[in-house]
Amino acid sequence: MDGIRDDRPDGSASDGGGAPARIRIGIVDNDPYAVAVLSTMIARMDARFECLWTCELGAVAISRCLNRARRPDVLVTDMSMNDVPGTEVCRAIRVKRADVGVVGVTSYAVDSFMDEATRCGMQALVGKTDLAGLAVAIRRAAQGLATNDAGTDADPASGGPRFLDAAEAHTLLEDAAYDVGHGALSPKERDVLRLYADGLTTREIADRLGVGTPTIATFERRALAKLGARSRAQAISICVRRHVF
Amino acid sequence: MTVEWFERLTDADRRTDNAWLLTAVLVVALVCAGETLAALASGTMPVVDATCVFAVVAATMLMAFRPVTGALAVTASWIALSVAAVDMPSAMLLSVLTAIGILGYAYRRAATAIAVAALGVWICTQGGISWISSSGTFDSNDHVLLGVVAMSGVAPVVVLFSGFLLGGMAVRWNHERHSERMELAYRRQRARAAQDIHDYVSNDLAYLILRLDKDIADGKRPGADELRELRDVAAGALDRTHQVIRVIEGDARRSPSSDGVWPAADHDGQASVHGAASDRADGTVAMPAMRPSFVPSHGIDADCPLAAQLRAIARSGDHRLAELGFDGQTIVTNVNDDAAQDALVAGLLEELYGNVAKHADPAGGYVLTIGIGRDAVQIALVDMASIAADPNHVSSDKDLPSGVSRSLGTGIARYRTRIAERGGTLNVSAPVSRIDAPTHETGACEWTLVGMIPLIG
């Protein structure tokens, strides 16, 4: 993770040391008129916001976010576009990178995209006309932080789906992309089971791997499903028998 | 338990209720009552028997309003009267057959058992069969229905019972199929309406609010021209709302997504400061005729044949390019549950992978997205065309900024023609953006291909 942030051409964004000097933003929306107004409005929300580029194709946005020279600090993406939905744009970026915060915007009901948006590694989802919420979400996303109370009536403590910070979402999605379909444990899944076998608690494992406890639970759940185990103890015993550790 | 059964029966009654059934049952009850009265008047039927028969007629009439309850009552009382050897009018058979038909509609298995039981009891009691032990065969009397139709033996009655039972089941099957079709059509109609509301109404309103916010932020009082423009946007949204309501109400002839051009607003002016294409000068906006909008779509769990076909090609294409050193990806998304395989789309996809391999810079990677919509497939490909590495592919297309596009190549040009024949588009372009110059750091420039291919059928 540490190696991801050091390849910026100008080091414009912060790497955790306080607020960034300027926040470079990419905007993608299939409606050119919405893009134009959105970029104007975003540029005036905060003196630090700089609209790096806008485009109308999800594919272009993905390509630029993965391109070292054109990578923004935050990508603002429409959720429903002609070529590819915003959730897939985000997933494609998040699997490979943690240093682009992604904020979804929609003119549709925010709640209808919420589940999928949290799963694809976005940091926030706001209504297209909620400019105040958008500004907050962009500022936080630039630092890789999730915003869970923007644009919805949902109580953040209600236990519903929650947005993850960019780094944690990247860890989850990158690991999930490992060895898809072959049933083998990913490195993170194996690490989690091994650390449980060593007697660590979930909290200790989370601290050691630098992620939250829900993420550890996700790794464990995936590992159990892959091994066909009904409990953590059975999963560990299967791993020992197969000499996985 | 009793309450539960009563509720189930009431529910079955409600589902089975039907105007034609009501008429038929009342006619049967009338005929039964008439035949009984005639027999009573002529003295061929004892008063006690006639009283019992009228009770069954009452049960028959109950079938008109509470079909299943009535049918159970009719069948039960008919079995009871057969066992008690009560003299029954021949039309009573029609009443029982109707009851069996109704039960066949409501409960298939139970109806079969009840029909077999009723028929068995009737054959043994009223069928006039006597067991002749010496020959081991059945003998039976003739039965005359309503004094006109003569039935010899039990076979015709067995056939009638089976016929009515199967008839009831067939009607049920037919109804279920019809409801499934209606349900599917309803769901599609709702999905289409939701899509249209999103694509046109929500976007217009969001645009309007953003424009107003901008004026508020500027502290600017809008001029007459701008007010007129914003009014047109609102009027466009209202017009679309009316069209969507028509779709919801079942008049899909002027579906917003099918006409492609909508009266609207000139969104130009300040909005197009960033170079957004300005094609609204004539007061209409040419929207893509078919938009595979990705409004959340529920209920599509499995890939349609087209998605499966394209995913297979994408897997092998990505794999081939990865072998050549490309770090790229293909994203196939699908909101269509029944798109058939399409040779044109599949062929284009193969061609695109070949084109990337030949003309793109492996270091720049590529992103290929394929959105399978309800009416069309949207394809977008972005890669980095390396100018230095491939000077022959610097633009020969006069419409495009020099150095930003590479030659279409004969392969893609051929697909463009075929797609145009189908009413679609395939364009290679420099992306509309604030930064569209080549990125000199990498020695490559962004190359974009966008296609819209209508689905057949």
Image: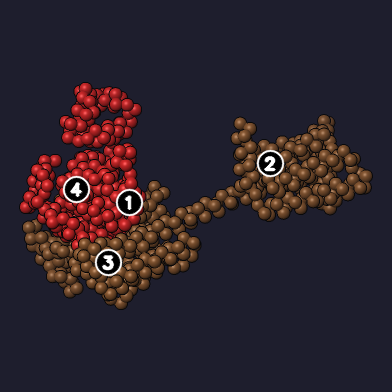
Which residue, given by chain and number where applicable, does mark 2 sit on?
B69
Q: The red chain is which one?
A: A
Residue B410, position as x, y percentages in the image? 22, 68
Residue B306, position as x, y percentages in the image? 36, 55
Which of label 1 and label 2 is nearer to you?
1
Sort mark 1 into few (<14), some (14-19) or many (20+) by Cα contacts within 10 Å.
many
Question: For the residues marked 1 and 3, what is the alpha-carbon distance in whole angstroms?
Answer: 33 Å
Mark 1 or 4 closer to N-term?
1
Which residue, given by chain and number where applicable, does mark 4 sit on?
A141
Q: Colour of chain B?
A: brown
Question: For the residues marked 2 and 4, what is the alpha-carbon distance in whole angstroms?
Answer: 65 Å
Q: Which image quarter is the C terminus of chain A in?
A: top left
Q: Which chain carries label 2?
A: B
Q: Mark 3 lies on which chain?
A: B
Q: Is residue B48 above or below residue B344?
A: above
Which residue, given by chain and number where applicable, does mark 1 sit on?
A110
Question: For the residues marked 4 and 3, what is the alpha-carbon distance in whole angstroms?
Answer: 36 Å
Q: What element carries label 2?
A: helix
Q: In this view, does B289 lie to the left or right of A171?
A: right
Do the residues marked 2 and 4 share a common chain? no
Report the residue at 22% width, 69% height from top. B270
Circle 2/circle 4 CB separation < 8 Å: no
